[in-house]
Image (cartoon, grey):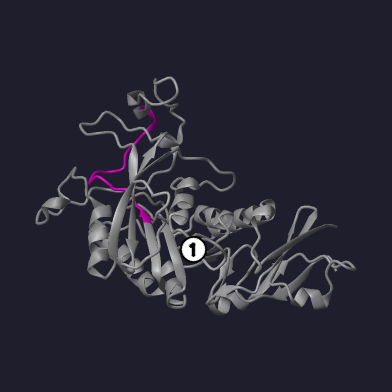
Amino acid sequence: MARGQAGIDGYVGDHVVAGNQGRAVCQLRFIFRQNVIDKTTMANYKYLMYEGDNLKRCETDKTIGPFPINCVAQGDCLHLISELPDESIDVLVTSPPYWGQRLSCGMGCEEDPREYLNVLAHVFSSVLPKLKEDGIVWINLGDAYNTPVNWRSKDSEYSSLGADKNGLSPENSAYAKPRAKRRAFVDKSQLWLSYGNLLALPNRLVLKLCDIGYLYRGEVIWRKKNPMPEGRCRRPHRAHESVFLLAKSEHHSFRTTPPVKSVWEFANEKIDGKTHFSRFPEELPRRCIAAFGKNGPDVVVLDPFSGSGTTGIAAIKLDCSYIGFEIDPKHVSASNKRLRRTIFDDVPLFTRSAVSIHSEQT
């Protein structure tokens, strides 16, 4: 039998889907060979994945609520967060969609930045009861000026970045990547919504989260080695982003030796597969998770805006368990492939008792 079907709750092809949809029939390719997989053995495996010439088997009984670990679930994060058990998450690391930078529908497309902040506050309010008492939250969020998004290829002539300091190529993604059609949102009754104002959206979000019960514990500056170029402008060129640390309780866990410094310097990076222009480098979630001071399969890491799955890769490499939520089905498929590849390629790192990996030539 070269191709078969199996009903697997929560897993459909490359997508992990919560709720009743997860009970849909999975279209996976099964290879049955004596001493490799028989029907009895198959019943003990939650996932069966065929890649190239290798039959990969990943056995795991561990789920967090309806969600299998080390997978990305497709759907609106607000709905999926509600299905998490209370006090089930140790570390949240995420970078929500920035205001006005998104092409597709969803969060980040709001015309009014106040609406954007309210939606984000609602998401993190929903997360609060899902955090363990010693849990922490890291939020990487870029700011925005109250101006249109209007970079064009010819603007490259104003840049002094690049290896030779003569600017980047006009084909560089800084100019060539697709852009949202964000317009300035001016409300004369609210002076902070004046045209050209730096809106301080990350700081406004942090204040909202403090009002709903989070403790604000600090800010890390991510100093970028290869920042995006900016044109001639009467303000500092941005070469950093902020990463905010919040906690549910004063008794949260955190690494103290060596101490976690407040400035991190590393570059952006490229990945294979589907392009995700707004992803952060793996080093960022790696440092955030390591700062928790504990690791192991009982440490559960959540990214409700999982994107390309970079937080999950960092979590798996640190021997933690991961759950990701993502609304874009293409990113769900691509990130689940990346997570599986990380698991299979980094077998020496994968020592947890809950998961065993085996590969046989077919």
Residue 220 versus residue 159 in the image, above or below: below
Q: Which residue lies most toward the left here?
A: 189
Question: What residue is pinned by disc 1?
Answer: 301
> Left or right: 13 with respect to 50?
left
Give the residues in magenta.
139-154
- Residue 304 appears in the picture as rendered: no
- Residue 195 appears in the picture as rendered: yes
Q: Which residue sits at x=26%, y=48%?
A: 183
Q: Which residue lies most toward the right here?
A: 34
Residue type, mark 1 in image: Val
Q: Secondary structure at mark 1?
A: strand
> Left or right: 134 with respect to 213?
right
> Left or right: 303 with respect to 192?
right
Q: Depth check: 156 or 228 in front?
A: 228
Q: Depth check: 136 or 2 in front?
A: 136
Q: Depth check: 198 or 216 in front?
A: 216
> Residue 148, how many percent across, how many down?
27, 43
Say which quarter of the image contains residue 297.
bottom right
> Residue 248, how many percent across, how many down?
34, 68
Q: From the image, give the main secondary structure of the stretch colored magenta.
A: loop
Q: Which residue sits at x=48%, y=58%?
A: 306
Q: Is residue 149 magenta?
A: yes
Q: Which residue sits at x=64%, y=74%?
A: 61
How crowded is the residue under tag 1: few (<14 C-alpha within 10 Å), some, or many (20+)? many
> Residue 304, how many percent across, how many down?
44, 63
Q: Which residue sits at x=27%, y=47%?
A: 144
Q: Is residue 186 magenta?
A: no
> Quadrant of the image for the N terminus?
bottom right
> Quadrant of the image for the C terminus?
bottom right
Say which quarter of the image contains residue 316.
bottom right
